[in-house]
Image (cartoon, rainbow, N blue to C red):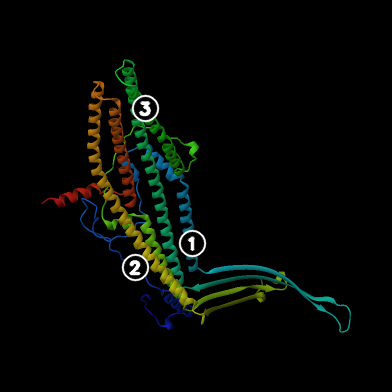
């Protein structure tokens, strides 16, 4: 695109100024399409969401937005400390951060094309030629001379068609994508640690349940043995009670390796050797957070992977301009000068001085279709990146919908499971009373015991699944969020009044 400019007659400008103005005017051109974000209809609300905020606003990627300490919604000081250590020492995050610094270096390298290249050199050459007579069999050296030189050069390729600017634009977009990749990597590592921690705490709660159940079963075994000793119960009741104790103890032991693996995963996520980290059991105090979902358009701002895909589409679009600039001639302004003399003492004198100055215009006439192929390749690359951006956004929307319906269904399931658990506890109380009264054998008690224990464990597993799904939903929404300011809340409440 050519920017508007006001021309002045050359009569009022020196020749050098006129040439500089012409170069600046030509440098305002930039071939290739200007970037437009690929269009995508994300809808006005989530299908599976409830109580969504009404309204719509155009989305703009917020690659550098602070994701916030989203894990604090679980209100666990130990978890907060573990995530802080992850942020400081996770090696995958460190690798992504190094990749981002590498991308910034490429941006600086691309920007160097805006500036001239300046060089300097110094040299000494000693030369001579042979001298001899015709027909003689020997020759002796002669005409030996020294040549001293001190030179400098300046070369600058004028960015007539915007090739350098498009290259910088592409590098900057790639760097922004790398920054978004860093955010996505950090968010993924945080989510993995939070999920491992929540699962570990649920296992601790299951361990306490099983240990308490083993203790209760041991009392029942002792009671059954006492009843057998006085001839009230049979030997089969004792065997059933002992089997019940040992099988439940085995279930408790089985949790140890699962907990150990979760501990090891947390250690590695924090950049620490598993042998140097342990996490003691703690009182279970986790609760499900309330997660504001927002609008689908906000997903394009909040998810770093979607922002990275959009920035890569912008980088690919700029490469189209770089490829198209190869069709046009390149203008190089160069200047050389220095001193050259056979005597070192006279090197820096006026007679030894030399210089050259002039532009050079170069253009490829025939390349067998190479440039056309590069333009087609750049356009196809942009189409691929645009499709990748749309797919990333659609995948993000699907994940949010998936976890919304998962949380909603699990909430209903937990209500039903709670009723089943209460019924199992009541059934267990009744059957134990009947056993003490001698109305039923211990096998009947064991069956109801197993059902009650299974209901207890299912309730804990369901809670763990809901906690894991809540983490997945937060990650699908892009991480942390900022609640509305109190003034904005008050203003919204006032506007809602009739």
Write down the residue under mark 3.
245
In space, the residues marked 2 and 3 are separated at their CA atoms by 68 Å
Mark found first going from the N terminus, 2 or 3: 2
Does residue 52 appear left or right of residue 212 in this picture? left
Instruction: Confirm or deny contact between disc 2 and disc 1 (CB under 8 A).
Output: no
| Residue 63, x across and y down, in percent | 37, 56
| Residue 396, x across and y down, in percent | 33, 56
Instruction: Judge depth for marks 2 and 3 and give the one in front.
Output: 3
Q: Is residue 149 above or below residue 274?
A: below
Label 1 neighbour load within 10 Å: few <14, some 14-19, many 20+: some
Q: Residue at x 61, y 73 (%)?
A: 337
Instruction: Judge depth for marks 2 and 1 and give the one in front.
Output: 2
Label 2 neighbour load within 10 Å: few <14, some 14-19, many 20+: few
| Residue 229, x across and y down, in percent | 34, 16
Mark found first going from the N terminus, 2 or 1: 2
Q: Is residue 423 visible?
A: yes
Figure disc tally: 3
Rendered image: mark on residue 106 = 1
Write down the residue under mark 2.
36
Q: Nearer the viewer, residue 160 or 442?
A: 442
Q: Residue at x 28, y 28 (%)?
A: 445
Residue 47 found in image quarter: bottom left
| Residue 447, x across and y down, in percent | 29, 31
Q: Is residue 427 above or below residue 185?
A: above
Secondary structure under tag 1 reads helix
Mark found first going from the N terminus, 1 or 3: 1
Q: Is residue 125 above or below residue 94?
A: below
Secondary structure under tag 2 reads loop
Label 3 neighbour load within 10 Å: few <14, some 14-19, many 20+: many
């Amino acid at each position: 695109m050519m920017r508007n400019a006001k021309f002045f007659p050359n009569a009022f400008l020196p020749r050098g100024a006129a040439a500089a103005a012409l170069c600046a005017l030509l440098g305002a051109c930039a071939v290739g399409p200007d970037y437009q974000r690929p269009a995508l209809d994300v809808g006005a609300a989530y299908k599976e969401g409830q109580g969504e905020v009404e309204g719509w606003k155009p989305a703009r990627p917020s690659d550098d937005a602070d994701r916030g300490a989203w894990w604090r919604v679980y209100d666990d000081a130990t978890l907060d400390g573990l995530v802080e250590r992850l942020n400081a020492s996770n090696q995958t995050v460190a690798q992504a951060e190094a990749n981002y610094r590498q991308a910034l270096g490429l941006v600086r390298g691309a920007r160097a094309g805006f500036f001239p290249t300046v060089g300097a050199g110094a040299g000494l050459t000693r030369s001579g030629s042979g001298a001899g007579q015709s027909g003689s069999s020997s020759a002796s050296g002669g005409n030996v001379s020294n040549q001293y030189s001190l030179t400098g050069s300046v070369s600058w390729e004028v960015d007539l068609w915007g090739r350098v600017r498009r290259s910088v634009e592409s590098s900057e977009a790639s760097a922004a994508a790398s920054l978004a990749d860093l955010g996505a990597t950090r968010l993924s590592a945080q989510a993995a640690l939070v999920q491992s921690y929540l699962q570990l705490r649920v296992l601790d709660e299951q361990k306490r349940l099983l240990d308490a159940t083993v203790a209760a079963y041991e009392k029942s075994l002792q009671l059954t043995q006492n009843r057998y000793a006085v001839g009230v119960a049979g030997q089969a009741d004792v065997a059933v009670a002992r089997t019940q104790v040992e099988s439940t103890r085995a279930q408790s032991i089985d949790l140890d390796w699962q907990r150990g693996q979760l501990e090891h995963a947390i250690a590695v996520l924090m950049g620490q050797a598993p042998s140097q980290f342990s996490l003691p059991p703690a009182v279970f105090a986790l609760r499900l957070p309330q997660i504001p979902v927002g609008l689908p358009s906000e997903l394009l701002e909040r998810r770093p992977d979607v922002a990275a895909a959009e920035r890569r589409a912008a980088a690919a679009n700029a490469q189209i301009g770089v490829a198209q600039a190869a069709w046009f001639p390149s203008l190089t302004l160069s200047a050389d000068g220095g001193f050259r003399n056979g005597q070192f003492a006279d090197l820096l004198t006026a007679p030894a001085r030399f210089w050259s100055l002039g532009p050079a215009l170069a253009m490829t006439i025939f390349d067998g279709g190479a440039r056309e192929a590069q333009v087609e390749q750049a356009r196809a690359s942009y189409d691929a990146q645009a499709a990748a951006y749309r797919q990333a956004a659609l995948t993000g929307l699907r994940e949010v919908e998936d976890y919304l319906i998962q949380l909603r269904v699990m909430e209903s399931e937990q209500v039903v499971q709670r009723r089943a658990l209460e019924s199992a506890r009541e059934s267990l109380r009744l059957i134990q009373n009947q056993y003490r009264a001698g109305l039923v054998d211990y096998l009947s008690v064991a069956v109801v015991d197993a059902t009650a224990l299974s209901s207890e464990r299912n309730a804990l597993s369901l809670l763990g699944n809901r906690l894991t799904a809540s983490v997945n939903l937060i990650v699908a929404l892009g991480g942390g969020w900022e609640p509305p300011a109190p003034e904005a809340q008050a203003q919204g409440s006032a506007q809602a009044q009739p």
